[in-house]
Amino acid sequence: MALSTHKETDLRNLILERATKLFQLFGYHKLVMEDIARAVGKSRSTLYLYYKDKDAIFGAIVEREIKAYLAELTAELQQHHSAVERLRAYFRIKFNFRYAKATEYLIMNQEMAQQPEMVNRMRIYTDPPETEYLMGIIRYGIATDEFVALPDEQIRLITTMMISALHNIANDVLVNVETANLSSVQTLLQLLFVDGILSR
Amino acid sequence: MALSTHKETDLRNLILERATKLFQLFGYHKLVMEDIARAVGKSRSTLYLYYKDKDAIFGAIVEREIKAYLAELTAELQQHHSAVERLRAYFRIKFNFRYAKATEYLIMNQEMAQQPEMVNRMRIYTDPPETEYLMGIIRYGIATDEFVALPDEQIRLITTMMISALHNIANDVLVNVETANLSSVQTLLQLLFVDGILSR
């Protein structure tokens, strides 16, 4: 029984690994369950015992990637003691993550530019944990007097605004990911959201 | 001949005025050309002599509204001599315009939340003139030493980023336009894009 559960976990992992590569190769729309079944050497009906459809497999892949991203973010934030540095790190890591995914999933990135509702479906996975992280940084910065003091309901609202803003900036800038000037975008993100554009 | 041209212009204006009210009442998807024909007291085939489809009428309405918005923006900006005040006015007027439209076109606002590609189609009309205005303000602020100096290609990029950011903030915040806390959003927009969140 333990062996069987172990095998099941192995097969689930194999499905997700192979499906990840297939989503990267074909994009979302043109990939069918049959492709994934072939890539794991099982029948389509076996595959359906594990995942009810393509969307469920994709959801599981997204969850794994976000988990890895949040682990990286946590590790990085712990290295910084000032809220300004944490906020800087947040925008850098978040944008780099989005950029890496746009490059790895090139066709899906193009599909998302054509069908923005795909982006909204992804945000169901990404927005809640992002909101918690970013609110934590802002609260910390207010406590250390680095940031302007804000009442609690405005902390939530400005966090939502920052996340909304960064989503659309990434989408617009990364439509043509091969030609995007990543280092300029990074510099200007810091200027917009951390330092501000006023000269001192 | 002059009279006939005059009458044609009158009828075009009447079509746009009545269609505006119908789009506000029914939203985009459920409105049909027949409704507009009824509201102007003409046959559908007469209507098609003036506009080839519903989308052409909607495009003409959007162009008129944007023209009025840009006139308001121009008048307001001329009253401010500092770039900081101009930037503040820009974000205030732009957000108020978007808020007013979300209220006037309540059903269409809900349709857009469901189908974000509708937003992208609107941006074809709005983004080019916005970009020129905002780049002008940033260039002016660099000339007056109010803003951090940026090379020209970065001025264009940061302008694009600001416009992208504000689009998504408005979309996310105005999904439930009746309950949106407009004054907090206004305050935080100024904090995000003009003053910066660092305490001084």
Image (cartoon, coloured by chain):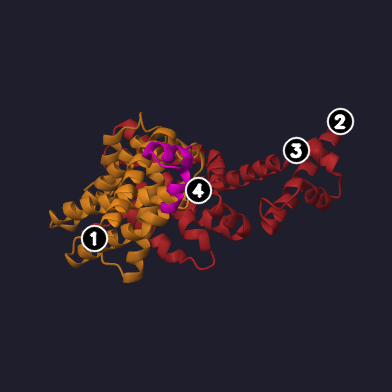
Chain colours: A red, B orange
| Image quarter of residue B159 | bottom left
For the record, the magenta segment spans B31-50
The quarter of the displayed image where residue B16 is located: top left
Q: Which of marks 4 and 1 is nearer the N terminus?
A: 4
Q: Both on one chain, marks 4 and 1?
A: yes
Q: Is residue A54 visible?
A: yes
Of residue B57 and residue A65, the one placed in the foreground of this image is: B57
Q: Residue B98 carries which label?
A: none
Report crowding for label 2: few under 14, some 14 to 19, many 20 or more residues within 10 A (C-alpha): few
Mark number for residue B137?
1
Q: Is disc 3 placed on a helix, strand or loop?
A: loop
Q: Residue A51 carries which label?
A: 3
User: Quick one: quadrant of the C terminus of chain A?
Assistant: bottom left
Amino acid type shown at disc 1 = Ile
Q: Quadrant of the N terminus of chain A?
A: top right
* Mark nearer the viewer, 4 or 1: 4
Q: Which of marks 2 and 3 is nearer the N terminus?
A: 2
User: How far apart, in angstroms, are the residues tagged by discs 4 and 3?
Assistant: 30 Å
Same chain for mark 3 and mark 1? The answer is no
In the rendered structure, the answer to whether residue A83 lies left or right of residue A26 reads left
CA distance separating discs 2 and 4: 50 Å
Q: What chain does badge 3 belong to?
A: A
Mark number for residue B117?
Answer: 4
Amino acid tagged 2: Met
Q: Nearer the viewer, mark 3 or mark 1?
A: 1
Q: Please, what is the three-letter code of the amino acid marked with disc 3? A: Tyr
